[in-house]
Image (cartoon, grey):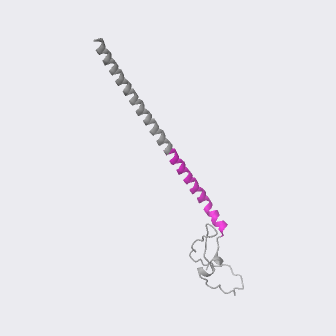
Amino acid sequence: MYRCFGSYNNHAWSFPSEPVKLQVTEDFGDTNLAPTEHTSFSDHWDLDLVTTEAEFQQDLAPWDHTAQNLLRIILAFLVLVALVCLLAEDWLWRKRAQEKANGASSQERRRRFRTQRRLNE
């Protein structure tokens, strides 16, 4: 019986896989080798290691790059949304300020016109 393990780094190993039984289909003549003892996971877990750290990291490499790229795209999108919000807020603020200035100048013109009309009368 064999078990597979994997690791993300030198300090963290995955849980063992389900036991796998290997069967040999060809006859090799002398088969007097006794099966190995059943060892528990806690005693000899690294003896059953089938997947090496390099192979495991190679399998994860495409996912790591994809996840990193997705994270970068999301962050860039959020920055763009924030910039658009800031631009929209500035545009609205300037528009309101201009409308207030136009409103104040038209009120001032009306007041001048009224006072001038009273003076002319």
The C terminus sits in image quarter: top left
Is residue 95 rendered to the left or right of residue 64? left
The N terminus sits in image quarter: bottom right
The residue depicted at 50 percent of the width and 42 percent of the height is: 83
Using the rendered view, name the quadrant where residue 116 is placed.
top left
How many numbered marks appear?
0
The residue depicted at 58 percent of the width and 71 percent of the height is: 14
Q: Residue furthest top?
A: 120
Q: In this rendering, is residue 23 above or below 80?
A: below
Q: Residue furthest front?
A: 119
Is residue 21 or residue 114 the one in the foreground?
A: 114
Q: Is residue 77 magenta?
A: yes
Q: In this rendering, is residue 62 above or below 24?
A: above
Q: Main secondary structure of the magenta part?
A: helix
Pinpoint residue 74: horizontal percent, then vertical percent.
52, 51
Is residue 61 or residue 68 the one in the foreground?
A: 68
Residues drawn in magenta: 52-81
Is residue 12 or residue 69 the one in the foreground?
A: 12
Pinpoint residue 69: horizontal percent, then vertical percent.
58, 53
Pinpoint residue 48: horizontal percent, then vertical percent.
64, 77
Is residue 30 or residue 77 the one in the foreground?
A: 77
Using the rendered view, name the quadrant where residue 25 is placed.
bottom right
Q: In this rendering, is residue 25 above or below 82?
A: below
The residue depicted at 44 percent of the width and 33 percent of the height is: 94
Pinpoint residue 37: horizontal percent, then vertical percent.
63, 85
Using the rendered view, name the quadrant where residue 103 is placed.
top left
Q: Is residue 47 magenta?
A: no
